[in-house]
């Protein structure tokens, strides 16, 4: 029996006709939001964050369009995007679209070989790369442009006018997929725009209820190289308008921190990541594994899990899940906790939405109803067939594959599904992955894998087979393969029972990048070969663990037994290494665990970080700022000027600066900070934070080492200094520098300038002491201008060891701002030190 499913016409009738009628192309859509003043993108690179409005992205897109024109890249030409999610990706995408240039996105975790094959096939005119990939320039290949060097400044150059048509190709998306040879899917302007009508109708109906909690922030953890990642971030969010949040890495600790601190409303994830978050929550909150009594009212259930909701933050309410099937157990877990799980169904070939659950009428286990303009039909063999305006015209340079996939006017999805009485679609599995037993019964591998993964000690599982299920497992030492199969078979139907089992010889089963789908063909070939050692994965553009370590010890012999002590890493090196490891291993790292005896082999299994200590964020509250302004104006600065008779030079060097600045003065006295604040213009004086030597307040941070009086006195001074000067601790000799660096980044991201003394201690003679290397790393990673400052005379007014100042002359000189870029931190520090000596 063939079942057909039409779109929800009631939903379609509510879509605003005026907006959609004007959107014939993506250029029309871009024009509708490109000048909005609302916030659009927030990006955290692990050190600090940046924010951009729709108007800023629009201006940058037009500037990129002008750049394409200047380089002779015209409509119909193709450029490759090979990068992690970042704001420049989106600005460059829209700049390409309005120029008629075809975007070819490639997952940043794909192999270099895959990238080069795509580049050769499409004859790309340029390759845009991010910071998480490595690609050397070829003399014969296209130019390589770094997105990190993207120009966000408004450009006076005129954007070339290009006539766009609905059937024009906007992008070609090459999918590595879990089976078969990669194919380039042609995506037209019409394909993408056809997906907007149904979501827009829902947004228009309900958006007014959410205005009190605007802006709605969506944490996007799906690569923009995938259509699912693009759909939410670039095409649906402007309809609200909402904010897209990008972050580096995918450690559960950091994801939860971002959700909580950035007041995220919705997280966009793939099922694999949702399972990882589930495990993290169950470890932190054992109560998450306990089910309240059946029939418990949702309000009591919410109260039962209130600590978990507090951990996420009170604005967070939903996960949008796609790109792969979500097992029912994981969906039930999050639903039970009181979070909404919104599933949809789509393919790259449908740009990508076929159906989705209305967030306000979700039915568990289904992927919702088709969007407006899309029809779904279930074929005789159970395959889901789709047709409509969102369906791609075909594959790039592959006529035979196009004809096979679009046979009879319907897109053959390769998925097996059913339609329930409410008109909602449920996906059962992949047609090619279904195992047909000799009795003619269908076995869906997903069903068996779900049972296997629920068994303690089973780290991962895949089920393949020609006529009977065969399990391929990754196990912990706590369980044997036979025991795992025995427990699974006790819960499976007769035709589902596992007949054979193999242990995968590597820590992880092979999966596709981004969507994390199992590569079943590769696993089946391995089983058929008798379990021969699988071929090593292809080289990717991302650094390996060994590559990361070599950056800190160039030219050294490095092996698994090499220790950090043998590499001679400084404390600053360890901080940077910690952050690089977090991004490489996708989990938070305990900085104190980076001991000198740690070997390279140990780093891959290093302990996760505990909850970080709280920093004095209260000092930036409105009340603290008001008290500080009064104290500075009425008491501290007038008192400072009584003793320090100041002459200020070089103020013209900072007059034209906008945004946060890193002031780098030499260090002579405890009076340096009030003198600098007195010398600064008011716009910096009242929006500045001061880095203070954490070890000076050892009795405050480690009261167990001191008597009560010493601890109290030290703590009192700490709180006074924090209130008066918005100071924060920065360690020089103990763990915690990574957390301090992140706090410093938060200050910069919030528009606060920072006073940072690169010498690290006070000079007795007034001559400069050797600079610590931290200032080079901070300036380069935070991408903030550094203003060199020279102080003279304070070592005589309040010398080191003195308790009361003596009036005298002081000179403060501001130098020209430096823009320190690159990774040669000693060289950057030398430039700054030379600039201060020359003042």
Image (spheres, rainbow, N blue to C red):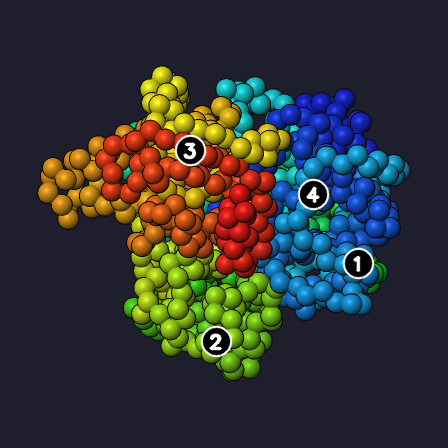
Q: CA distance from mark 1 to mark 4?
A: 21 Å
Q: Earlier in the sequence, mark 3 or mark 4?
A: 4
Q: Is residue 434 visible?
A: no
Answer few, some or many: residues within 10 Å of disc 2's Cα (few below 14, many 20 plus, some between 14 and 19): few
Q: Is residue 784 above or below residue 203?
A: below
- Looking at the image, is mark 1 or mark 3 earlier in the sequence? 1
Q: Which residue is mark 4?
A: 151
Query: Which disc number belongs to residue 124?
Result: 1
Q: Which residue is mark 3?
A: 810
Residue 764 percent across, percent down from the top left: 33, 47
Q: CA distance from mark 3 to mark 4?
A: 40 Å
**In the structure shown, which secondary structural element does the residue marked by tag 2 occupy?**
loop
Residue shown at 44% from the left, 69% from the top? 507
Mark 1–mark 2 Cα distance, whole angstroms, equals 38 Å
Tag shown at residue 556: 2
SS label for mark 3: strand
């Amino acid at each position: 029996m063939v079942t057909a499913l039409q779109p929800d016409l009631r939903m379609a009738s509510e879509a605003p006709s005026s907006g959609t009628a004007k959107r014939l192309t993506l250029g029309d859509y871009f024009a509708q939001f490109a000048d909005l003043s609302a916030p659009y993108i927030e990006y955290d690179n692990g050190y600090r964050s940046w924010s951009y409005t729709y108007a800023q992205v629009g201006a940058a897109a037009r500037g990129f369009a002008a750049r394409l024109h200047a380089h002779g890249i015209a409509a119909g030409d193709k450029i490759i995007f090979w990068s992690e999610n970042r704001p420049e990706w989106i600005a460059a995408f829209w700049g390409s679209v309005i120029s008629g240039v075809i975007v070819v996105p490639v997952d940043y975790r794909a192999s270099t070989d895959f990238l080069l094959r795509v580049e050769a096939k499409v004859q790309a005119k340029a390759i845009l790369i991010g910071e998480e990939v490595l690609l050397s320039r070829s003399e014969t290949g296209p130019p390589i442009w770094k997105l990190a060097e993207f120009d966000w400044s408004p450009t006076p150059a005129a954007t070339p006018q290009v006539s766009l048509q609905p059937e024009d190709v906007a992008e070609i998306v090459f999918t590595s997929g879990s089976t078969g040879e990669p194919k380039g899917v042609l995506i037209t302007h019409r394909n993408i725009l056809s997906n907007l009508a149904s979501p827009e109708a829902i947004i228009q109906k309900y958006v007014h209820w959410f205005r009190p909690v605007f802006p709605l922030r969506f944490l996007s953890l799906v690569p923009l190289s995938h259509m699912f990642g693009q759909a939410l971030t670039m095409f649906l969010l402007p309809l609200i308008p909402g904010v897209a949040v990008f972050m580096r890495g995918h450690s559960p600790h950091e994801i939860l921190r971002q959700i909580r601190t950035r007041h995220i409303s919705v997280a966009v994830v793939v099922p694999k990541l949702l399972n990882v978050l589930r495990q993290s929550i169950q470890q932190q909150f054992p109560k998450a594994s306990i089910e309240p009594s059946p029939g418990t009212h949702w309000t009591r259930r919410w109260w039962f899990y209130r600590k978990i909701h507090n951990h996420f933050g009170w604005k967070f309410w939903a996960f949008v899940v796609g790109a792969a099937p979500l097992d029912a157990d994981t969906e039930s877990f999050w639903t039970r906790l009181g979070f909404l799980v919104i599933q949809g169904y789509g393919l790259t070939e449908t740009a990508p939405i076929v159906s989705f659950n209305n967030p306000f009428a979700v039915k568990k286990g289904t992927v919702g109803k088709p969007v407006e303009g899309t029809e779904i039909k279930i074929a005789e063999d159970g395959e889901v067939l789709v047709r409509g305006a969102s369906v791609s015209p075909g594959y790039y340079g592959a006529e035979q594959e196009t004809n096979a996939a679009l046979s009879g006017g319907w897109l053959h999805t390769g998925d097996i599904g059913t339609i329930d009485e409410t008109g909602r679609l449920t996906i059962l599995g992949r047609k090619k992955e279904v195992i047909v037993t000799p009795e003619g019964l269908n076995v869906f591998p997903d069903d068996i894998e779900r049972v296997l993964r629920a068994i303690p000690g089973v780290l991962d599982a895949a089920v393949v087979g020609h006529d009977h299920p065969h399990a391929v497992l990754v196990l912990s030492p706590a369980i044997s393969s036979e025991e795992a199969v025995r427990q699974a078979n006790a819960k499976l139907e007769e035709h589902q029972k596992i007949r054979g089992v193999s242990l995968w010889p590597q820590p992880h089963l092979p999966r596709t990048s981004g969507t994390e789908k199992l590569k079943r063909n590769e696993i089946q070939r391995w089983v058929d070969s008798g379990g021969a050692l699988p071929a090593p994965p292809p080289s990717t553009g991302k650094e390996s663990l060994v590559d990361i370590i070599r950056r800190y010890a160039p030219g050294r012999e490095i092996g698994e037994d090499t220790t950090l002590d043998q590499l001679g890493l400084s404390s600053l090196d360890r901080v940077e290494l910690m952050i690089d490891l977090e991004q490489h291993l996708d989990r938070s790292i305990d900085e104190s665990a980076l001991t000198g005896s740690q070997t390279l082999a140990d780093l891959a299994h290093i302990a996760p970080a505990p909850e970080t200590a709280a920093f004095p964020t209260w000092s930036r509250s409105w009340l603290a700022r008001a008290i500080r302004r009064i104290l500075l104006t009425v008491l501290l600065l007038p008192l400072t000027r009584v003793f320090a008779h100041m002459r200020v030079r070089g103020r013209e060097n900072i007059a034209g600066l906008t945004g946060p600045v890193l002031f780098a003065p030499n260090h002579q006295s405890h009076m340096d900070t009030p003198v600098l604040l007195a010398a600064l213009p008011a716009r910096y004086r009242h929006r500045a934070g001061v880095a203070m030597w954490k070890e000076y307040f050892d009795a405050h941070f480690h009261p167990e080492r001191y008597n009560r009086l010493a601890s109290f006195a030290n703590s009192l001074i700490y709180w006074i200094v924090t209130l008066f000067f918005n100071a924060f601790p920065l360690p020089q000799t103990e763990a915690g520098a990574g957390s301090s660096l992140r706090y410093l980044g938060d200050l910069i991201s919030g528009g606060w300038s920072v006073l940072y003394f690169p010498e690290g201690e006070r000079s007795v003679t007034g001559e400069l002491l050797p600079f610590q290397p931290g200032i080079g790393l901070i300036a380069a990673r935070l991408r903030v201008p550094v203003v060199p400052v020279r102080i003279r005379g304070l070592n005589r007014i309040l010398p080191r060891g003195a308790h009361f100042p003596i009036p005298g002359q002081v000179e403060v000189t501001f130098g020209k701002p430096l823009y320190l870029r690159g990774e040669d931190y000693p060289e950057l520090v030398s430039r700054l030190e030379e600039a201060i000596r020359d003042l």
